[in-house]
Image (cartoon, grey):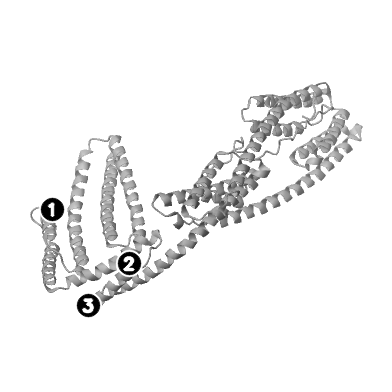
Amino acid sequence: MTEIQNPTEEPVVEATAAEEPQAENSATSIATYETKAQVVDRLKALAEGDEEVTRQELDSLKSIFYRIQHQEADAAYKKFIEEGGSAEDFLPAPNLEEGEFKAQMAVIREKRAAAAAALEQERAANYEKKLEIIEKIKALTENPDEINHTYNDFKELQQKWNELKEVPAEKATDLWKSYQQAVEAFYDTLKLNNELRAYDFKKNLELKTAICEAAEKLAEETDIIAAFRKLQQLHQEFREIGPVASDLREQIWTRFKDASTVINKRHQEHFETRKAQEEENLAKKTAICEEIEGFALDELKTFAEWNSLSDKITALQAEWKTIGFAPQKMNTKIFERFRSACDNFFTRKSEYFQSVRDNLNQNYALKLELVEKAEALKDSTAWKETTDILVDLQKRWKEIGTVPKKYSDQIWERFNAACDAFFAAKKESTSDVRAEQTANMEKKKGIIAELAAIQPEQFEGDLRAKLRTAQEEWNNVGHVPFKEKDKLYKLLREQMDRLYGYLNDNAKAQRLNRFKDSIKNNNSGDIRTRLVRQLDILKNEIKTYENNLGFLNLSSKSKQGNALVEELNRKMEKLKADMDEVKAKIAALDESKKK
């Protein structure tokens, strides 16, 4: 703490560590983020809102954004390899959020620059206004005979002074000294009665004593940074209070100065310790950068060599994450150096793999051409001519080399499916098979017609047994013409769904009536709680099915996939029906309680 000889002057706090270096263990809380989108959202909020933006938070957001980016790239690569992918086929996903990230950072920088300029203008204006107040106080003192009549004017000037806040830092101390001198001159000239003068001094002493007690209490604060900042606020409050009796001025100032010294010392020691740790972190991170930059990439000639070095860099990236922040002025620079070294390696690796990938892609283009030709012929009925062409395509397929692994299964399935479809249709075209399948088709149409004729409201007997029997008869009928198979099955499902729907609706109505009867004399909340829990379970199951359906609709184009989608839809409809029944029971229970 800077020593001040005049005890009435404002105590000045040292600023040797006021500008805090960014550190991971800083007491100033910086939120953590799990995704780049969250970082961008935070930047948008800062760019569009009125919240104060600190350099510390901006540096932290930048560091977190690029750290997450590298983590995602590492995770994607490892997952790709674990799922059987070849290292040469891996390509990092494009960083879609980086453009928005940079745009929001630019907006924030402009806002901070504008805010800084506006703050400087405000400080300059406050300085001029405070100079005017000092001159007005001096003017009040020039006429001692009228001093009693100008006391209210003096108090009004003091109020205006307190309402004006920051001034240029380099002028603050001299300005405060001038103000205090003018104020004390006024009080020394004031010829109010002793009671009023003593009351004013007493009130100021009480306020300053309370501030001293608050400053002394800060020594117990475990958050050193928070304690230091609270001390700055106490200094501001101390200076806004008028003087105390002259014989107590030195005493109250000394007490406040001593309490401030304790906090300042702890604050300084805290940052000296952290600064040493940050320097050590910088040395470790510099060593990692030098190691990566020293790798001889021109000597790597095989996939194994590239992948081996890739593992080393991944390990160094993991080590980097365990090291804390470097000094604030170097933290961003050392991270950019590290990122540049890693990016250079993965770019060179990608270029090497690309040279091999070009040959695989050429093979893919050739096989894709064969697939398209086969798919164009799969519905042909020129059996002999088309058979010769497809056999030739199959021969040419075997002569073409491998394709990228991620396309291998997909393109083969398309080619094989097209060939199988043609040869299956060719086989079905024989007269004996056709006749048998046509007869089977008529049997299945008869089952469908029999079900369509049933009016469930008028049916006598066990309808469920009838439906089970119909299903068994259907299953026992042999193959039908390939092109009619799906259409017939769809018609069967329509009739089954219609009749089972009627049965299920009746059953649900009966269960609801039994439930209503069972709760007439039972208003226990346990039943409702159990029903609400059951409703939540059904909702979650429906949501899971919806998510699965969304995935299947996007990813599955095969007939097998379509059948799975239909099955999931039927199960989801069943769950929705169950959920409606539970809702009806809850409504019935609530209605019974009203009665």
Side of 233 relative to 366 (left or right): right
Given this view, does label 2 or label 1 mark the residue nearer the observer? 2
Label 2 SS = helix
Q: Is residue 430 visible?
A: yes
Q: Residue at x 83, y 33 (%)?
A: 180
Earlier in the chain: of badge 2 and badge 3, it is: 3
Label 3 SS = helix
Residue, disc 2: 398
Residue, disc 1: 464
Q: What is the quadrant of residue 549 in the picture?
A: bottom left
Observer-nearest of 552 and 201: 552
Earlier in the chain: of badge 1 and badge 3, it is: 3
Residue, disc 3: 384
Residue type at numbered disc 3: Lys
Task: Point out residue 243 in the picture as x, y percentages from the top left corner.
Answer: 80, 28
The circle on residue 403 is none
Task: Point out residue 47 in the picture as x, y percentages from the top left corner.
Answer: 61, 52
Q: Is residue 279 above or below residue 120?
A: above
Observer-nearest of 257 and 306: 306
Q: Is residue 478 above or below residue 70?
A: below
Task: Point out residue 418 in the picture as x, y percentages from the top left corner.
Answer: 28, 68
